[in-house]
Amino acid sequence: SYFRMRTLSLSKLFTVTNLNSVRRATIMPATEQTIEDQRAKAGFNFREAIAPGLVLEMPLNGILHSSKSEFQQIDVIDSYFGRTLVTDGKTQSAQFDEFAYHETLVHPAIFTYIHRTGKAPKTVFIGGGGELATAREVLRHPGVERVVMVDLDGVVVDVCVKYLPEWGGEAVMSDPRFELTIGDAYAYLLDTKETFDIVIMDISDPIEAGPGIMLYTRELYQHVASRMPPNGVFVTQAGIADAVPPPHVDAGDRDTTCFGPIRNTLSEAFDVVLPFTQSVPSFGSDWGFVMAFSPPNDESKDSPILPIDVVDSLVEKNIKGGADSLKMYDGITHQRMFHLTKAVRKQLATDKRVMTKDNPVFMY
């Protein structure tokens, strides 16, 4: 029988070989590396769809938190990019590069305001921002007296404070200048009688059925513009903005990029609109941002990019700790952000879409 043949074969082996040698040859002690190699073969991966036909995939080292709030699925994972906040399957913020996103979103707008007015902004509104890192960057400016943040999902805020301590959420929450409201930023902006020197939209991408789509519409932008003081500055994140535009930007009505539409929509509410970009590796692409303002008294609409020495001076004078407190942003980086590649400029010039309540544009 097969069993007997196997027995005989093993018996013959033992008769010609020292038993201890056999053990060493057939049951070699596993090293830590071989164990890890074997585990890697059966490991779990984090997989995120970035664009049509494009997927970012990496080993999932751990799941620190997973829950579902009233509004979205919330996960905190450990991956190639370190601790990462993921909502509804989309990366929102990663330990490896969150500073690149948040410094880019905040400081160009604030320094543009300071440069144009000669004074620090007193009041800042943040729509979204649940990680609290946008507020962290705003609060680096001692001249800011009040920061109002309105986020729809209080669960996200609590999760980030607990599981993403490196983002500095506890310090933000304990700063007396910071005010947190859990609620709808869209409704808040429509109802408030307040004005803000700076309005920062750090909200979820405009995905279909997502909670933030109304915050990207012409109607909202026009209302906010009417409520801002002279030289007030508005800035928003604006989705994928690769230096070499991906193939699907030529898909016509099926184009799922929003960099162009957000810029176009803001142009219908503000006189000066400035698109800029920053590489955010954990997002799987370069990322777009758009800043907008309306100069008072028919002032020239020309808005030159702040010179290197001006930005570096503003950083030293207006940020607690100066340049050493920032990981990425400085004068040279500021210049690079606003100098878009030829391919991006060409793509923006041909994109005529505008986002309205009745005709939204959805990201992938």
Image (cartoon, helix red, strand yellow):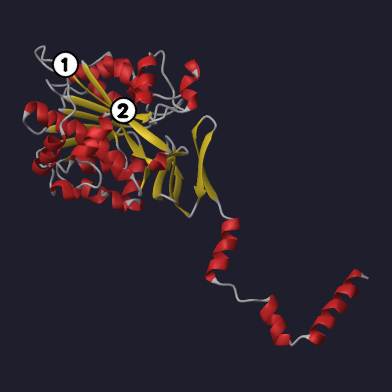
State whether residue 36 appears in this view: yes
Point out the frontmost of discs 2 and 1. Answer: 2
**Mark 2 and mark 1: span between their CA atoms?**
20 Å
Toward the viewer: 76 or 10?
10
Percent of width and height locating residue 50: 48, 34
Compared across the picture, whether 326 is left or right of 203 comes to left
Percent of width and height locating residue 129: 30, 37
Q: Residue at x 48, y 55 (%)?
A: 61
Quadrant where the image shows the N terminus: bottom right
Q: Residue furthest left?
A: 118
Q: Amino acid at mark 2?
A: Leu
Compared across the picture, whether 68 is left or right of 319 comes to right
Q: Residue at x 9, y 34 (%)?
A: 120
Residue 340, labelled with which disc? 2
Q: Is residue 203 above or below residue 158?
A: above
Q: Residue at x 39, y 30 (%)?
A: 205
10 Å crowding of disc 1: few (<14), some (14-19), many (20+)? few
Q: Is residue 298 above or below residue 44?
A: above
Residue corresponding to mark 1: 301
Residue at disc 2, secondary structure: loop
Toward the viewer: 10 or 350?
350
Q: Write down the quadrant of residue 229 in the picture.
A: top left
State whether residue 132 appears in this view: no
Q: Is residue 48 above or below residue 259?
A: below
Toward the viewer: 274 or 83?
274
Q: Residue furthest right?
A: 1
Q: Residue furthest front?
A: 342
